[in-house]
Amino acid sequence: MSAVGLLYVGAVLFLNGLALMGIVKGTGATPLNWFVGFLQVLTPTYLIFTAGGDAAVIFSASGLYLFGFTYLYVAMGNTWGYDPTGLGYFSLFVAIAAVAYAVANLVWFGDYAFFVIWLQWAVLWFLFYLVLGKGMASLTWITGAVAAVQGWITAAIPAFLLLTGIWQTLDGAIVAIVLAVVFIVAMVILRSRQPAPAEEVAHSNA
C-alpha cells in the first residue's frame, strides 16, 4: 500500500471508529468514506495497469481493493440505507484475506512490519463482521474503539514515518511491533472505560 493511501486509510478508520462509538453523529463520516473509497479503488487500478506484468506490484495493489470496497460499501449503505449484513459478510471475507496477505508479506517479501499490521486489520474486520453480519450490537463500541486506535497505529503513523523516511531508517518491523504493543495497551485502557450497556444502566437505576 502506498504511504499516501495508507495515511487516508488512517483518517477514515479513525472517523468510522468514532462513528461506531457514537462520537461522530449520524452520517458525519460518510463523505470521507466516499473520498477514500474512490482513492483506494482508482489507485490500485492505475498501479495494476502500469505494472508491466510485475507480479509483486500487482499483488501489493490487489490488497488496496479490500479497503476501497469496504469504504464505498459503508458510504453507499449510509447514503442509501442498505442492510448492513452484506457489509458484515464482506468484512468476514476481508478478515480472511487479510490473514493471507499477512502470511504472504512474511513468506514472500520478508516484511515483518506489514505481517503484524495485516494481522491487526484481520482482527478489526472480523469485529466488523461480528457487529454488522452477526448483529452483535454489544461489540459496537469496542469495535469502534479498535478502529479509531488502529487508524493511528496501523495506518496514519506508519504512513507518516514512511513519507518522512523515518520508517526506512529505523527497523520497520520493530516500529510495527512497538505500535502493536501500544495498540494493546490502548485497548485495555479503553475497554476499562467502555460505557455500560443501556440495559445495565437502566437496571442499576431501578
Image (spheres, helix red, strand yellow):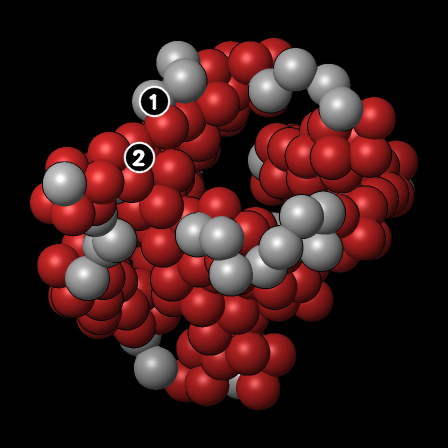
Point 36% across, 46% down: residue = 141
What number is the disc on residue 185?
A: none
> What residue is at 46 percent from the left and 15 percent from the top?
133
Secondary structure of the residue carrying numbered label 1: loop
State the image coordinates of residue 112 (x, y, percent, origin top left): 30, 53
Q: Does the rendering let one see residue 97?
A: no
**Is 11 on the left or on the right of 105, as rendered?**
right
Name the residue: 62% across, 55% down. 25
**Identity of the residue drawn at 34% across and 22% down:** 136
In this picture, is 147 found above or below 107? below
Q: Secondary structure at mark 2?
A: helix
Q: Position of residue 157 (x, y in %)?
A: 46, 74
- In depth, the one of 96 and 162 nearer the eye is 96
**Amino acid type for the residue under numbered disc 2:** Leu
Location of the C terminus (image quadrant): top left
Residue type marked 1:
Met
Question: Is the Cβ of the residue at disc 2 closer than 8 Å to that at disc 1?
Answer: yes
Residue 189 falls left or right of residue 75: left
* Residue at the disc numbered 1: 136
Using the rendered image of the protein, determine whether residue 8 is visible from the camera's viewpoint: yes
Q: Is residue 192 above or below residue 43?
A: below
Residue with the mark numbered 2: 139
